[in-house]
Image: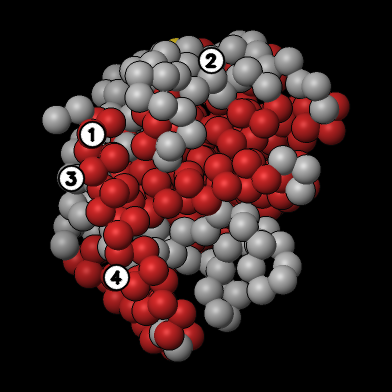
Amino acid sequence: MSDDSLVIEAFDSRVKRREERREFFKSMTGVAAMAGGLGLLSSQAAAQTAPTDNDILNFALNLEYLEAQFYTFATTGSGLPNSLLTGTGTQGAATGGRQVIFTDPVVGQYAREIAADERAHVNFIRTTLGSAAVAQPAIDVGVAPSGAFSSAARAAGLVGPGQSFDAYANDENFLLAAFIFEDVGVTGFKGAAPLLTSKPILEATAGILAVEAYHAALIRTTLFRKGMQAPALIEATERISDARDSLDGPLDLDQGIQPREGGSNIFPSDGNALAFSRSAGQVLNIVYLNPKAVDRGGFFPNGTNGTIRISAAN
């Protein structure tokens, strides 16, 4: 079965149960939701050898490579310099990216700021890890019909069967592509926080999480503003959110930017205004574009480098 078929099959199944799960989640008390989240983290951590702080930082480094390459290509037309790509494991190339010709100068400024932040994150984590830093693995940020962006967009219903999604074609496509990554990074860093044992590393990770949350809010705000004149953009975020939910497990926690309770939905949260967490395996489900336990696919065609490589079995 193709990656597209796996994603679409999971997406269809999730849609059938969407309303039931949403009502269930709404009915949960804040204490129960927090306890459930912590219990999930504990059970996942116990199911395998507990990762070290370096393991977790290297997993984060893989994700930062992905984001930094996407934004750097989008803003400059070129990828990261080789001096930021070396390390342990098999070094791969980032393929398929190109520069976006931004028509909205504000979006272009936002993109350049985020690109600089993501490059700084890569450099900071590599410096923190020193010789333990993993090399960048092979990364797919291209627009081919068989590529990761197109597979994700088809699963979300943004393009039809066999069609490609060009993340670099215009401001709106760029923003939707960024939306795929940013929310996932925030939930992934939050999920990793309880597993870290070093206070200095926890503090540094909290700093990265805060910046990623700013990025996610900026992307969501810009999409919401544009969506006021082009409602299809808001609907597209809901479809991407549904597709992410179809990959990372049975709960319907992810949210697009559809207005809720008479206001915007810039910050996806529970009834206590708390962000939710994803385990490393759930993050890999999304970036591998596969709801099953696999070690590669999607944006990482050969998998990530480091000890955290296998997605969750959902």
Residue 194 placed where, x, y %? Answer: 41, 67
The mark nearer the N terminus, 2 or 1, is 1
Q: Name the disc covering residue 5, or none.
A: 1
| Figure quadrant of residue 69 | top right
Seen in the picture, residue 73 relative to 223 is either above or below; the reply is above
Judging by the rendered image, the residue that carries numbered circle 2 is 97
Please tell me whether mark 4 sits on a helix, a strand or a loop. helix
Residue 287 placed where, x, y %? Answer: 37, 38
Please tell me whether mark 1 sits on a helix, a strand or a loop. helix
Residue at 63% x, 18% y is 169
| Figure quadrant of residue 174 | top right
Judging by the rendered image, the residue that carries numbered circle 4 is 40
Crowding at label 1, few (<14), some or many (≥20) Cα neighbours within 10 Å?
Answer: few
Please tell me whether mark 3 sits on a helix, a strand or a loop. loop
Crowding at label 2, few (<14), some or many (≥20) Cα neighbours within 10 Å?
Answer: many
Judging by the rendered image, the residue that carries numbered circle 3 is 293
Q: Nearer the viewer, mark 1 or mark 3?
A: 1
